[in-house]
Image (cartoon, rainbow, N blue to C red):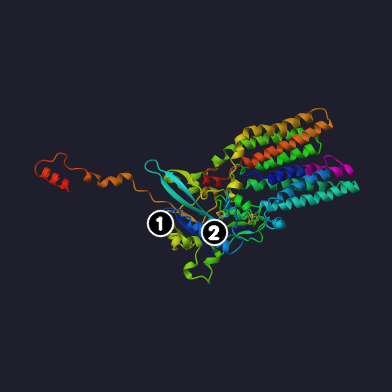
């Protein structure tokens, strides 16, 4: 799949933002007043910034509100509802914290649940696609949730939770790579089933329909990036997990904390890039590519 | 609505005969012509006369080589467009309701004024049957020429999809799969029509008729023994005949 920057930025930032909102909703850290204002501003910038970035890849962003209509079948529509609900509930909760020094705990819990639900609905947009076997497995939502919780713990300054959550997220990400690497073969689609011609012999793509490229090849066939995937996986793990965990384990210091956050953020970007670049869509088979 | 109908009254679709298709791409051109000049957003081309031309097409013809265990390889031309799946994943993922499957005839369509161009339906289609138009920003796909097949302004013989009407080889057939006696149902039964990527669970309506086996080269030699010289060194009358015939 083509790793579109808008979608990578969206899933990374909004994942972090909703992770932070989850922790704020649970009262971690138990801030009020202007400190709370700072935390909520960061969370909203990330979550809303991510959502805004995702509208850049729409052909008609002006009709985006129509995406609320099909929640019965569409995970993208459910994501629209969950995110709107989470942002609304957390806005009320945050308003009371900042301006009235009041913490309505149940409202915070609801906001936290909706925030996690948003991350889950985002992950299901990818998980539901049988056409992309690497994503079409239960570990995809686990990965999105684990990364979001790890990032939320890190941003909320819950150091001891963050160390555990980041390490756990690292394990989940590694597991998702191991599971993902064999998914395409397991799903059982190849040029033989794609054309139905396998019963007559070995099928080979002889001539593509056009000499030039097209939307399908641009969007779904991305071979270049996979060359370096082993190296990039290592870089992702170092930046996303190793460095932040070390920085957090050291005696607290603002510089170390900043290093942990920045390194984790860049690491998640790399992992998200791989999430798209390594994913193979079955339509590539028709072009003799994967 | 992006919920799929439990059942459709009719099941309109195509049978594509891989044995007959000659790979001329006439269906590709007539499809683009009809669908860019009529209903909905035009099918745009970018850089059409430049170094990297690219454009939106609803039907594309691939060519594959099939190498049997023994004997010569076979070239199969393979037109591909929307299969109007019964269990269409492209419809259920659509967040806006722009994509839908019609209850009356099973045609899968996009309502372009509702489409936000998120591209998710194209991600969900295993066959590459949907393309987001680069200029219009809306999703385009085969409509089974819904604006021809019911169009009473057209002469009767033109009320079929443009690709079917134009195919010079007669490799494309249009009809109702819900009717067991229709042309397409019979062809599908008689020739053992294939589903593309059945493991994807899409239940495609369109069927592909497998190419027939090529003649085996061994059979070509059936007459060969009779062509061999009967006698190498002829004697007597035969020698005279041989010599005489050689002169002419
Ligand atoms: S072929 Fe693709 S676009 Fe057409 S109905 Fe099936 S899944 Fe949808
Ligand atoms: S591109 Fe249009 S038709 Fe396809 S899923 Fe998005 S809104 Fe629906």
Q: Is residue A180 above or below residue A57?
A: above
- Check if residue A248 falls in the magenta segment: no
Describe the element under mark 1 as helix, strand or loop.
helix
Q: CA distance from mark 1 to mark 2?
A: 31 Å
- Residue extending furthest toward the front: B247
Main secondary-structure element of the magenta-colored stretch: helix
Describe the element under mark 2 as helix, strand or loop.
helix
In the picture, which quadrant includes the N terminus of chain B? Answer: bottom right
The residue marked by circle 2 belongs to what chain?
A: B
Say which residue label 2 marks.
B32
Range of the magenta residues? A20-38
Locate residue A46 relative to residue A207 in the image: left or right: right
Say which residue label 1 marks.
B190
Q: Residue at x 47, y 61 (%)?
A: B166
Q: Position of residue A141 (x, y in %)?
A: 67, 43
Q: Position of residue A206 (x, y in %)?
A: 47, 45
The residue marked by circle 1 belongs to what chain?
A: B
- Residue extending furthest toward the top: A250
Q: Residue at x 66, y 60 (%)?
A: B114
Please identify the quarter of the rendering in which residue B20 is found: bottom left
- Check if residue A37 falls in the magenta segment: yes
């Amino acid at each position: 799949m083509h790793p579109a920057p808008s979608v990578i930025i969206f899933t990374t930032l909004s994942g972090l933002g909703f992770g932070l909102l989850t922790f704020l909703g649970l009262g971690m850290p138990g801030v009020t007043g202007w400190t709370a204002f700072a935390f909520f501003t960061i969370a909203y910038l990330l979550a809303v910034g991510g959502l805004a970035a995702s509208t850049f890849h729409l052909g008609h962003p002006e009709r985006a509100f129509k995406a609320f209509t099909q929640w019965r079948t569409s995970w993208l529509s459910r994501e629209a509802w969950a995110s709107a609900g989470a942002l609304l509930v957390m806005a009320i909760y945050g308003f009371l914290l900042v301006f009235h020094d009041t913490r309505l705990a149940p409202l915070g819990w609801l906001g936290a649940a909706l925030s996690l639900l948003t991350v889950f609905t985002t992950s299901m947009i990818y998980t539901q696609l049988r056409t992309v076997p690497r994503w079409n497995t239960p570990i995809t939502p686990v990965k999105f949730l684990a990364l979001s919780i790890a990032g939320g713990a890190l941003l909320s300054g819950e150091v001891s939770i963050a160390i555990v959550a980041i390490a756990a997220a690292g394990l989940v990400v590694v597991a998702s790579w191991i599971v993902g690497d064999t998914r395409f073969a397991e799903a059982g689609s190849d040029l033989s089933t794609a054309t139905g011609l396998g019963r007559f012999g070995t099928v080979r793509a002889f001539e593509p329909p056009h000499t030039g490229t097209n939307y399908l090849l641009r969007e779904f066939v991305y071979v270049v990036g996979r060359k370096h995937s082993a190296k990039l996986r290592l870089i992702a793990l170092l930046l996303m997990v190793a460095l932040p965990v070390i920085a957090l384990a050291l005696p607290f210091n603002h510089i170390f904390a900043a290093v942990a956050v920045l390194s984790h953020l860049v690491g998640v970007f790399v992992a998200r890039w791989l999430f798209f670049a390594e994913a193979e869509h079955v339509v590539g088979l028709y072009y003799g590519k994967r | 609505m992006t919920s799929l109908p439990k059942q459709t009254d009719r099941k309109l679709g195509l049978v594509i005969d891989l044995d007959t298709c000659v790979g001329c791409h006439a269906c590709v051109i007539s499809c683009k012509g009809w669908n860019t000049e009529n209903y909905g957003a035009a099918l745009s081309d970018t850089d059409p006369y430049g170094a990297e031309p690219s454009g939106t097409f609803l039907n594309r013809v691939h060519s594959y080589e099939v190498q049997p265990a023994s004997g010569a390889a076979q070239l199969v031309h393979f037109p591909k467009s929307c299969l109007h799946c019964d269990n269409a994943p492209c419809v259920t993922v659509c967040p806006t309701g722009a994509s839908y499957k019609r209850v009356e005839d099973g045609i899968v369509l996009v309502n372009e004024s509702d489409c936000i161009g998120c591209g998710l339906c194209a991600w969900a289609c295993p066959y590459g049957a949907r393309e987001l138009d680069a200029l219009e920003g809306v999703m385009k796909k085969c409509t089974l020429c819904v604006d021809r097949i019911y169009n009473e302004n057209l002469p009767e013989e033109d009320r079929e999809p443009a690709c079917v009407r134009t195919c010079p080889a007669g490799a494309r057939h249009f009809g109702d799969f819900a009717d067991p006696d229709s042309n397409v149902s019979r062809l599908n039964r008689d020739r053992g029509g294939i589903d593309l990527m059945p493991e994807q669970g899409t239940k495609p309506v369109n069927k592909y008729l497998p190419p027939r086996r090529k003649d085996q080269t061994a059979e070509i030699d059936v007459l060969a023994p009779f062509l061999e010289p009967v006698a190498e060194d002829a004697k007597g009358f035969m020698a005279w005949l041989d010599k005489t015939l050689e002169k002419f």
